[in-house]
């Protein structure tokens, strides 16, 4: 980790997503562990198919930085959400709903993709 992150005064702004990797062809959104997975996927997509993926680290999912996501959709016109959660009621569902409720739906060239965990009941 960088010295900046190790500083005791370092803060991650809540509700502000960060573009971890700029791209032009597609957005990959995720948080926590899925950012590492997203970087691996972006590397493969660039090498095999010459697809440039923008990776957005959501940092916080409540509240979600919808403006950053919509801004990137306007630029790339494609989006994939990567999430460890179940598909129903997961963060990808919320991002999808945000797109449906705004003009961003008209900016998409293809439906939003979601990569999620298995759709199973979770024992509590």
Image: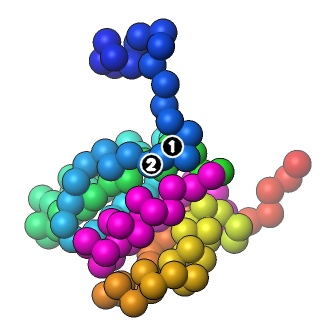
Quadrant of residue 100 within the rendered picture: bottom right
Task: Find the magenta span and give its range.
Answer: 63-87
> Is 45 placed above or below 31 here?
below
Q: Is residue 26 magenta?
A: no
Among the two numbered marks 2 and 1 on one chain, the one whose residue lies closer to the N terminus: 2
> Is 39 placed above or below 85 here?
above
Q: Is residue 74 magenta?
A: yes
- Which mark is on residue 34? none
Give the residue displayed 55% in from the left and 68% down from the top.
95
The answer to which of 118 and 15 lies nearer the viewer is: 15
- Give the residue number, with chain letter if any, for mark 2: 17
Mark 1 crowd level (few <14, some 14–19, many ≥20, 10 Å Cα)? many
Left or right of 2 on screen, residue 95: right
- Give the residue number, with chain letter if any, for mark 1: 59
The answer to which of 16 and 83 lies nearer the viewer is: 16
The answer to which of 120 and 15 lies nearer the viewer is: 15
The answer to which of 106 and 117 lies nearer the viewer is: 106
Give the residue displayed 21% in from the left and 71% down from the top.
25
Q: Position of residue 111 (x, y in %)?
A: 42, 85
Q: Residue furthest top?
A: 8
Helix, strand or loop at label 1? It is loop
> Is 97 placed above or below 47 here?
below
Quadrant of residue 52 within the rendered picture: bottom left
Left or right of 38 on screen, residue 64: right
Residue 34 visible in the current orientation = no
Q: Position of residue 112 (x, y in %)?
A: 44, 78
Locate the N terminus and report the quarter of the image it occupies.
top left
Helix, strand or loop at label 2? It is loop
């Amino acid at each position: 980790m960088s010295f900046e992150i190790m500083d005791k005064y370092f803060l991650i702004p809540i509700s502000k997503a960060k573009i971890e990797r700029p791209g032009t062809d597609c957005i990959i959104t995720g948080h926590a562990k899925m950012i590492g997975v997203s970087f691996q996927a972006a590397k493969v997509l660039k090498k095999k198919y010459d697809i440039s993926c923008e990776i957005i680290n959501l940092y916080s999912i409540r509240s979600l930085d919808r403006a950053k996501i919509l801004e990137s959709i306007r630029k790339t016109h494609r989006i994939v959400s990567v999430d460890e959660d179940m598909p129903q009621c997961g963060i990808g569902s919320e991002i999808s709903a945000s797109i449906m409720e705004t003009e961003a739906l008209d900016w998409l060239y293809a439906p939003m993709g979601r990569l999620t965990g298995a759709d199973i009941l979770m024992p509590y």
